[in-house]
Image (cartoon, rainbow, N blue to C red):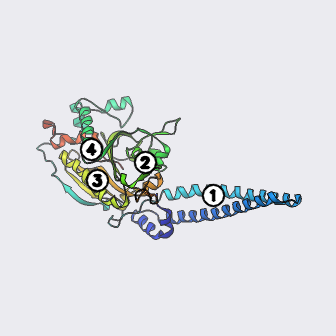
Amino acid sequence: MLDINLIREDPQLVKASLVKRNMDPALVDTAAGLDARRRELLVQVEALKAERNAVSKEISTMQDKAAKDARIADMRAVGDKIGALDAELAAVDADFEAAISVIPNIVEDKVPAGGEENNIVAKEWGDKPTFDFEAKPHWELGEQLGIIDFEAGVRVTGSRFYVLSGAGARLQRALIAWMLDLHTRQGYTEKYTPFMVKGATLYGAGQLPKFKDNLYKDAEEDLYMIPTAEVPLTGLHMGEILAEEQLPLRYTAYSPCFRREKMSAGRDVRGIKRGHQFDKVEMYKFTTPEQSEAEFEQMVADAEATCQALGLPYRLLLKAAGDTSESAHISYDIEIWAAGCNEWLEVSSISRVGDFQARRAAIKYRPGGGEGQPLLAHHQRLRPGVAAHPDRRAGELPAGGWLGDRARSAAPLDGRC
């Protein structure tokens, strides 16, 4: 979440960023008003508590019983006032937290205003494949080859689930291992994290409360199936104070991901697009503010290198403010050409979020050899990546000619934010 001092000191900056995102700038006024009321109540409560403490000492030395009883009665009234103000303060605090949690990060100056129609193509790499036949989408070719079984997925679980078989399952497993190995060579440390997390971890990662309806939750425990490996990776250092010498921390992790995807209603969900369960390999960094920009640019390069190593033509999009993740200063999407659908489809979103997530997750580092005041760490993330969605890669690789005479496949790809 944003630093409340930024809203107090420069509300116009925050409002201007909201306007770029096509959001209501009045959100700032709501949060500022609640913040002001919260501070007023704190002053009143502290003043009354100070009075009560002082009078309590006075009462302990009083000899006159009538005067003493009168002062005790006065303090009971003060206690009632404190109780009422504490209750109001708790309510205002809850409203304030709800208000500030929906105000997104400040977008960088170079991020264009508006929605996805204003996204800018920053780069293209590779040539689109051409065929002397009509390319087939993966939902046709995959079934013909016996490597994707949609009916079995529906029979076992329900709609938007599928089963990979034979070469399809082996390719999925091979891509996961290959991507983890690639990112390890790029300097990331592999992590194997839990696939279920506490609500507090989801809140710290910015998934709750906004995406509550898209999460799968245990009916009896405070546990959720993860929607992305970003969540447990964020949770690794929640509430910690790291040493500056530890940074940057560069992590990569494989995880299955689970999403109810309610927001996908009406969208193209054919085949393995927009499934409720999918595999993903994530890249994630914790940095100092000084390291942040360079580490972000390197992460973009690492994501591009994944596409290049697979020989998949792609383009890099600078996302417009209204299409940028709410936690990010800036985001790039990588879209790969899906010949079977004859369109570009997103497979990766790489974001620099600054201290936005660290503030909510209370992740800090201590500069100056352990002598300085703790500061909030900065995050860079790739979610989900080109290295993510190995299942999508399993469909796309044949389109690039990787499986010889199976080059008639052209799987649409899909990415998630």
Query: Which of disc 2 and disc 1 is earlier in sequence?
Result: 1
- Give the residue at mark 3: 299
Query: Which of disc 2 and disc 3 is earlier in sequence?
Result: 2
Label 1: state its secondary structure. Answer: helix
Query: Which of disc 4 and disc 3 is earlier in sequence?
Result: 4
From the viewer's side, name the closer residue of 170 and 39.
Answer: 39
- The image shows residue 229 at horizontal and vertical percentages of 37, 44
Disc 3: CA contacts within 10 A as few (<14), some (14-19) or many (>=20): many
Query: Which of disc 4 and disc 1 is earlier in sequence?
Result: 1
- Give the residue at mark 1: 89
Relative height, residue 389 to residue 72 (above, below): above
* Of the two numbered discs 3 and 4 in the rendering, the one whose residue sits closer to the viewer: 4
Relative height, residue 373 to residue 266 (above, below): below
Disc 2: CA contacts within 10 A as few (<14), some (14-19) or many (>=20): some
Which image quadrant for residue 367?
A: bottom left
Residue type marked 1: Leu
Residue type marked 3: Met
Position of 298 with respect to 133 (left or right) is right
Relative height, residue 49 to residue 232 (above, below): below
Which residue corresponds to the image point at 32% horizontal and 52% vertical from the top-left?
A: 349
Cα distance in 3D space between marks 4 and 2: 20 Å
Disc 1: CA contacts within 10 A as few (<14), some (14-19) or many (>=20): some
Query: Which of disc 1 and disc 3 is earlier in sequence?
Result: 1
- Give the residue at mark 2: 237
Residue type marked 2: His
Query: Which of disc 2 and disc 4 is earlier in sequence?
Result: 4
* Of the two numbered discs 1 and 2 in the rendering, the one whose residue sits closer to the viewer: 2
- Give the residue at mark 4: 184
Residue type marked 4: Thr
